[in-house]
Amino acid sequence: MLELWDTFINRLRNFFRSRGYLEVSTPILTNFPNLDSNVEPIPVRVKFKGKHKRLWLQTSPEYSMKKIVSKYRKSIFQITKAFRDNEYGRFHRHEFHMLEWYKVGGNYKDLISEIKDLLRVLFGYRDFEELTVKEALKKYAGISLVEEEIKFRELLSKKGISFKEDEDWETLFYRVFVEIEKHLGKDKPLFLTDFPTRLCALAKINNNRAERFELFIKGVEIANGWTEETSEIEVRKRLEKEAFKRDLPVDEDFIKAHRSIPPCAGCSIGVDRLFTLWLGKESLKDTEILSVV
């Protein structure tokens, strides 16, 4: 297993280096948490110059890497550790490896093309499928994609899907989507595209859809990427909304970095998941070398 992991990681590195990406390393402990409604950051209490201070284990190197892109305007990649609270299951762990990269001058379609090349190298895949979120909802749940909350509730009620009155649109969406995703990428890798604006994260919005995608292989989410929103004003609006909702601090330096960030696209891949599928295994426990849980 040690030798297989070494081979796999080096293939990832060689792929990106061969395409002109520079490998970087960023801090795992950060002053601010990533603001993502679906991810729980882990706070860490440290002693700094004799005083206690709260830091955060990164849930993704996104903020640090975008600061580098903003300053040096180079395409970069990194394989690092990420940490998320309340995560454990067949393909979930509190601590895991993440591959993240940023393509300067690229968009989400360029990333999809690049990932197809990577999967050809790793798995020998030749055929791929692309499906919009709207198409996936209709095909697997028989539900139309509606971003108006009251109408979406009405659609779910007609389908006999129960929910609580205080659940917001995003919670309702994922209540449906969790049943859909197990069908995605069953026969060949599937790229789910054109996310609703309510699920834009930090993706650029175009024609009322977020330029965002997720990759699924055998019902498992592997990658999440998008064309980056580069407007400082828009990024601030999205992050402050999330920070207020969850009572978390905002990284002002990250927001200000968007004053000079070039047009680019970024993507992350769960390396442990991809490695497990590469070996034809059924869960992370089949490929773990050491585990604390």
Image (cartoon, grey):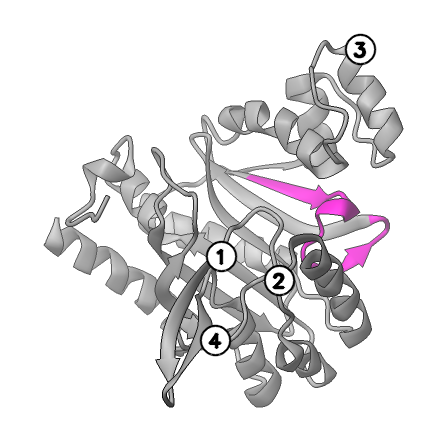
Q: CA distance from mark 3 to mark 2?
A: 37 Å
The residue pinned by badge 3 equals 158
Q: Is residue 202 visible?
A: no
Q: Amino acid at mark 2?
A: Leu
* For residue 159, above or below residue 10: above
- Residue contact at pointers 1 and 2, CB within 8 angstroms: yes
Q: Nearer the viewer, mark 2 or mark 4?
A: 2
Which numbered disc, 4 or 3, marks the residue that appears first in the sequence? 4
Q: Is residue 198 magenta?
A: yes
Q: Nearer the viewer, mark 1 or mark 4?
A: 1
- Residue contact at pointers 2 and 4, CB within 8 angstroms: no
The residue pinned by badge 4 equals 76
Which numbered disc, 3 or 2, marks the residue that appears first in the sequence? 3
Q: Nearer the viewer, mark 1 or mark 2?
A: 2
Residue density around tag 2, few if under 14, some if 14–19, many if 20 or more, within 10 Å: some
Q: CA distance from mark 2 to mark 4?
A: 28 Å
| Number of numbered discs overlaid on the protein picture | 4
The residue pinned by badge 2 equals 248
In the picture, measured across the screen, residue 222 lies left or right of residue 50, that is right
Q: CA distance from mark 1 to mark 2?
A: 10 Å
Of residue 19 and residue 93, the one placed in the foreground of this image is: 93
Residue density around tag 3, few if under 14, some if 14–19, many if 20 or more, within 10 Å: few
In the picture, measured across the screen, residue 16 lies left or right of residue 276, that is right
- Magenta residues span 191-208
Residue 75: which disc? Answer: none
